[in-house]
Image (cartoon, grey):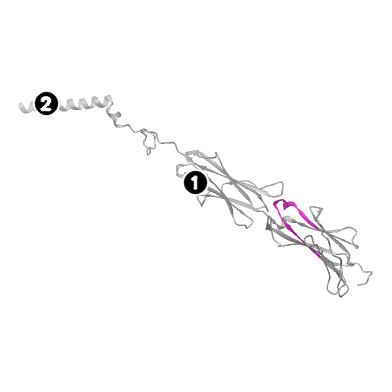
Amino acid sequence: MSPASIVPPRLRVGSDPAGPVTRNKSVTFTCRVEGFYPQGTSLSWLENGNETDPGKPSRPTENPDGTFTLQSSLESPQPRVLPEHESVSYNVSSTVGLNLSAGDARSQLTCQIEHSTLAAPLRGTYDLSHALRVPPRLRVGSDPAGPVARNESVTFTCRAEGFYPLGASLSWLENGNETDLGKPSLQAENPDGTFTLQSSLEVRATEQRNPSVFTCRAVHDSQPPVSASATLRVSLPPTEPGKDPASSDGDPALPTWALFSSPALWIGLVLEKVLTGAFLFFLFLRSKG
């Protein structure tokens, strides 16, 4: 390539791994600048428009074929400058590693290159949301809280908070068995770009459910399910003295001493004795006649 030739650079930005990763995991981002001439370049990284530590590039070294190599990165500051096949043009590659957090759902990473052929810096932008996956945090509660009276209505609420990307489902289990799916709300977006989903389940506090464990299970973005539970406890009234626990109508059983203290009972017994005696006396007189 003649000294008078000038070739503007081409720029590509990618990540490794290419798919989403969970928060606090490291992702390597690569900026590749290809096919430019002459070889003088300036490469920098920006996060959300703010320049990150550019590092300290090494001095260019001349290769046997007369081309040059320059290495720089944010961790071990070295973009590599390589000749492209047989032509006298150059490629630059720079790599940066980041630990993603839930707050990166709306963040961008930018690779910026300056070259003598460009009127303004050339930028390649990568949305960190493409590499981010945040599992939901679950909270389960009941209203009213604590033990409740028999046959009272209880509402269990499950909140799946701070997950990314969009797309989560909630289901309910009673003592480990799938039950009513409940009433889910719409998925709401949080200020940091993550999402929240809520589901409620209404049950009746029967004696047979004392106690019962209600579990909320969340499935999100092909990740293993996460779950949280709350226990239903029914407050049963104590059995009153003299009351038959098996009686459904709640009528008290009369004690033995109460039966013999009834005046009607005594009158009945006396009449029975009088009638029996009169009948026997009648039979006696008939036998004499």
Percent coordinates x, y for residue 185 in the rendering: 62, 46
Sooner in the amino-acid sequence: mark 1 or mark 2: 1
Magenta span has 129?
Answer: no
Left or right: where 247 falls relative to 13: left
Q: Residue 281 carries which label?
A: 2
Q: In which quarter of the image is residue 34?
A: bottom right
Q: What residue is pinned by disc 1?
A: 212
Counting from the top left corner in percent of width and height, residue 10 is at 84, 64
The residue lying furthest to the left in this view is 289
Of the residues shown, which amino acid type is indicated by label 1?
Answer: Ser
Residue reaching furthest right? 4
Label 2: state its secondary structure.
helix
Question: Mark 1, mark 2: which one is toward the viewer?
Answer: 1
Q: Give the range drawn in magenta.
A: 93-110
Examine the rendered structure and indicate whether residue 194 appears above or below residue 95.
above
Under circle 1, the secondary element is strand
Above or below for 284 versus 14: above
Task: Please name whichever residue, 289 or 195, is drawn nearer the observer in this view of the structure.
Answer: 195
